[in-house]
Amino acid sequence: SSDLIMKAFRLIFLILVSVSITIQAQQMTAEGQSQVPWWSNSSYMAIDSSNSFLMHTEIEYSYETKSGNLEGSEHDAKFLIAIRKKHITNYTMLRSSHYYYRIIPSNQEVTMDQYKFDNIVRIDLGTLFFIDAGFYIEKDSKMLLDRRTAIYSGIGIYTSLPFHADLNVTVGGGNDKKEYSAMVPLDDETYVNLYYALTFNYMISPHVSFSSKMRLQHQYYDAQNYEYLSESKFLVPMNKNVSLVYILDWNITNKPWPGILRADTHQAAGIQIHF
């Protein structure tokens, strides 16, 4: 089943790359790109990109409570800032999640934390292609991960679809180092990763938008040791700067540690502030 998942994702990825090139070749006018936000689009599509300086910020917060046999709360905060000067864009992302639960029958308390800092520098090569280079630092106590540091780079394609949507496709690789909790009976490990990423934004109507990010990464020497990460969200704007948001995360670790589930799903509702 793991082989089928990998082969299916790679096939879909290649098809999307082909479709992206075909559609982009037919959508090269500024008028056809007007629905795409600048931080998702090539700087070459701007009317005057020679001296442009742009900044976009998003702050997102969601809160969730549970009661019954499992009682507790979840707090999830995200921050994004995109800064563009000419044809170079820097994306800085920070996520902080805190989970606190109490198992009522046994009165056992469980606390988990997740932190991730991600920084990407993007250089647009034209209206179609771009280069990404970045790094991220992560901690995830529920996956027994004390610290994870990765450096990566890749090349991608911009696509503006005719129905008020855009699709960006990226492929690349990098170096990944994991430092595990003392509960894991293995030494820390460092390896080379390959990754395939898709970003999709769709303006369903003036009052509802949808966005999705998907990333498949696997070890270069062991394709069966892979991770699939996805985040999808619906946004309903309340005004120019505030939106209600519904979030669905679905993550898969194909070879988790004993006692850790292979798939992890998270749903939440919250608020996003953007300016």
Image (tube, grey):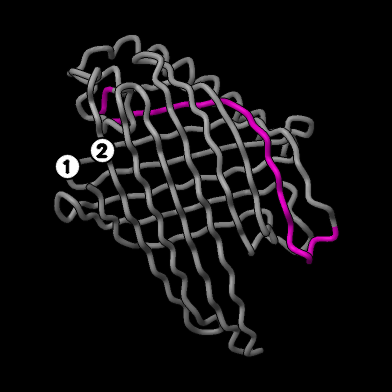
Residue at image position (47%, 70%) is: 74
Tell me the CA gap for discs 1 and 2: 7 Å
Q: Amino acid at mark 2?
A: Met
Can residue 32 be seen?
no
Q: Main SS type for the magenta part?
A: strand
> Does 177 appear in magenta?
yes
> Which quarter of the figure is the N terminus placed in?
top right
Is 253 placed left or right of 185 in the picture?
left
- For label 1, the crowd category at 10 Å Cα-Cα, with few meaning under 14, some 14 to 19 and many 20 or more, is few
Q: Residue 69 placed where, x, y %?
A: 56, 84
Q: Secondary structure at mark 2?
A: strand
Q: Where is mark 2, residue-wise?
A: 203
Q: Where is mark 1, residue-wise?
A: 206
The span shown in magenta is 162-185
Closer to us: 175 or 157: 175
Q: Residue 166 placed where, x, y %?
A: 34, 29
Q: Residue 85 placed where, x, y %?
A: 30, 27
Q: Amino acid at mark 1?
A: Pro
Determine the image quadrant of residue 191: top right
Residue contact between numbered discs 1 and 2, judged by CB atoms under 8 Å: yes
Determine the image quadrant of residue 64: bottom left
Q: Residue furthest left?
A: 239
